[in-house]
Image: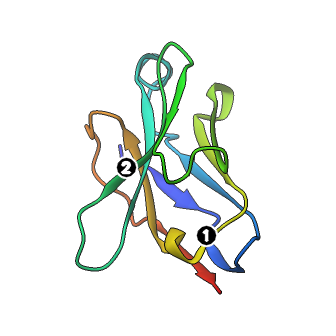
Amino acid sequence: VRPVESGGGLVQAGGSLRLSCKASQAITSFFNGNSWAWFRQTSGNQRELVATFTNTRSTNYADSVKGRFTISRDSSRKTVILQMNSLKPDDTAVYYCNTLQESLRWGQGTQVTVSS
């Protein structure tokens, strides 16, 4: 199973983007039984955990995005969503999703570029 991320693009600071992660190949019990997360990576840096949606439906966020990003899950579509508001140039990165345990092969990610 490899997630497929989409929804990235170029946006001005203060703008919004909605990222989607589809794990359509995952069986339903796997999708619902795992905690899912969005990560981001900039060139030359390690992948950073941005937001988590746990299997108990709680959410957690990195301090840098708290109050601006919202993670959600659509089990019927096996999709994990990241709504990003009030974007800043520092949010520029390639965004990936995976289980919190990083148990799946990494997808290609989706590029988010925020201009100042």
Quick one: 63 or 110, which is closer to the camera?
63
Q: Is residue 94 left or right of 74 when viewed as pictured? A: left
At a point 35% along the width and 43% down the height, the residue shown is: 1
Determine whether 70 is above or below 44 in the image.
above
At a point 35% along the width and 74% down the height, the residue shown is: 42
Q: Which residue is label 2 attached to?
A: 2
Q: Is residue 76 left or right of 96 when viewed as pictured? A: right
- The x and y percentages for residue 36 are 44, 34
At a point 33% along the width and 55% down the height, the residue shown is: 48
Q: CA distance from mark 2 to mark 1?
A: 18 Å
Q: Amino acid at mark 2?
A: Arg
Of the 4 image quadrants, the one containing the C terminus is bottom right
- The x and y percentages for residue 83 are 69, 50
At a point 47% along the width and 17% down the height, the residue shown is: 55
Q: Which mark is residue 42?
A: none
Determine which quarter of the picture holds residue 99: top left
Determine whether 45 is above or below 50 in the image.
below
Quick one: 41 or 76, which is closer to the camera?
41
Determine whether 34 is above or below 46 in the image.
above
Q: Amino acid at mark 1?
A: Gly
Q: How is the image coloured?
A: rainbow
